[in-house]
């Protein structure tokens, strides 16, 4: 969702360098990242609470716990054969912005909290699901991913089983089309898209899916933002990601929609048999979410599960 200027400037502090082809040892981004030894990076904590704009009240007890994946998943080593590497974290610390309020403002804030009994933090909650597709199949029958609450929008992509489980010679972000012909999202008695896409990547018939991805990201409705994914990258360079807007306010984070309880499932069809080892379909979905804090700073979350 970041533009090319941000990717080539601010995000480099996080160790990000843009790849024009995922999984290629010749990609400029990979060549800039390549190397062994120590590196220092800084990045925003990308979790729901940190991605919303409101400031936390004083006196909140916040504990962050990170669980790193295995080294085979984290390290890209396309040009080292069977050599193994180890990803070690030597030191971690957090930089926190703190605001000093005047006594009058602090007292007024506490009075409002006691009067209204609750302070709310609306946010967009991201959920990730995945399911396995057996080898030698022409389709993936309906897989129910979310069983109660309708997401705003969702994105999905296909990755090899080896890359999904982690290996030094593959990238877990290498999303390829794998001769996919149709993607169907079933929810609330509806199906997206309204008609079959009838994709054929080998014969350059995929532009509808590409435009739909950009629409879901909100880039086709303005002329000042982009995500740097061009048509060729979407077709065969590891950026084959499908986007679907389920809510009419999918790209407007300032508006919440009424909760709609439903099951959301995905169906896939392929032109040729799925490869040896099988595939994983990775689905990223966004939901409306509200966190409440009472006067004692106890958090309370939405009761609707995903």
Image (spheres, rainbow, N blue to C red):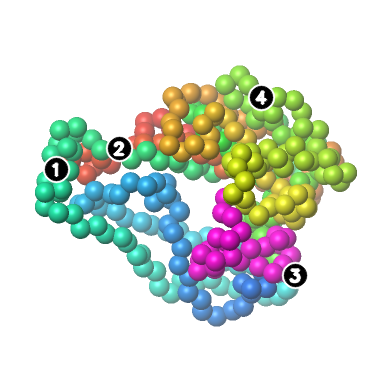
Disc 2 vs disc 4: which is toward the camera?
2
Residue at 66% in and 24% down:
191
Task: Kindly report the distance in space between the C-alpha atoms of the residues bearing marks 2 and 1.
Answer: 17 Å
Describe the element under mark 2 as helix, strand or loop: strand
Task: Kindly report the distance in space between the C-alpha atoms of the residues bearing marks 3 and 1.
Answer: 59 Å
Describe the element under mark 4 as helix, strand or loop: strand
Task: State yes or no: discs 2 and 4 in contact (Cβ < 8 Å).
Answer: no
Q: Which residue is mark 4?
A: 191
Residue at 17% in and 37% down:
112
* Numbered-mark total: 4
Q: Which residue is mark 3?
A: 26
Mark positioned earlier in the residue sequence (4 or 1) = 1
Left or right for 287, reference 97: right
Q: Tell me if residue 219 is in the magenta stretch.
A: no
Q: Tell me if residue 23 is in the magenta stretch.
A: yes
Disc 4 vs disc 1: which is toward the camera?
1
Label 4: few (<14), some (14–19) or many (≥20) C-alpha neighbours in 10 Å: some
Q: Of the numbered discs in the image, which one, if any, rests on residue 108?
A: 1
Label 1: few (<14), some (14–19) or many (≥20) C-alpha neighbours in 10 Å: few
Between 136 and 234, the one lying in front of the other is 234
Residue 258 at what x, y percent from top left? Answer: 44, 24
Task: Kindly report the distance in space between the C-alpha atoms of the residues bearing marks 4 and 3.
Answer: 40 Å
Locate residue 242: give its quadrant: top right
Mark positioned earlier in the residue sequence (4 or 3) = 3
Extent of the magenta region: 1-29
Q: Which residue is mark 2?
A: 120
């Amino acid at each position: 969702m970041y533009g090319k200027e941000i990717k080539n400037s601010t995000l480099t502090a996080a160790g990000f360098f843009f790849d024009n082809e995922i999984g290629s040892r010749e990609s400029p981004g990979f060549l800039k990242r390549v190397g062994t030894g120590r590196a220092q990076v800084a990045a925003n904590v990308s979790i729901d609470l940190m991605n919303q704009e409101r400031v936390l009240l004083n006196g909140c007890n916040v504990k962050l716990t990170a669980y790193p994946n295995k080294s085979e998943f984290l390290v890209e080593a396309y040009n080292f054969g069977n050599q193994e590497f180890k990803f070690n974290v030597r030191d971690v610390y957090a930089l926190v912005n703190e605001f000093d309020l005047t006594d009058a403002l602090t007292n007024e804030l506490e009075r409002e909290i006691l009067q209204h009994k609750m302070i709310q933090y609306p946010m967009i909650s991201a959920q990730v699901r995945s399911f396995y597709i057996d080898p030698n199949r022409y389709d993936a029958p309906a897989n129910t991913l979310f069983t109660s609450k309708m997401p705003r929008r969702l994105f999905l992509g296909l990755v090899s089983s080896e890359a999904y489980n982690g290996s030094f010679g593959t990238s877990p972000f290498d999303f390829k089309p794998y001769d996919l012909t149709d993607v169907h999202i079933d929810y609330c008695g509806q199906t997206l898209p309204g008609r079959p896409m009838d994709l054929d990547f080998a014969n350059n018939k995929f532009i509808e899916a590409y435009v739909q991805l950009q629409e879901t990201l909100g880039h086709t409705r303005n002329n000042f933002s982009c995500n740097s994914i061009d048509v060729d990258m979407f077709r065969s360079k590891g950026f084959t990601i499908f986007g679907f807007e389920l809510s009419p306010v999918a790209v407007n984070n300032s508006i919440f929609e009424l909760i709609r309880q439903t099951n959301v499932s995905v169906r896939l069809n392929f032109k040729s048999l799925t490869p040896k080892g099988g595939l994983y379909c990775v689905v990223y979905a966004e939901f409306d979410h509200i966190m409440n804090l009472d006067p004692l700073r106890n958090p309370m979350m939405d009761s609707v599960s995903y």
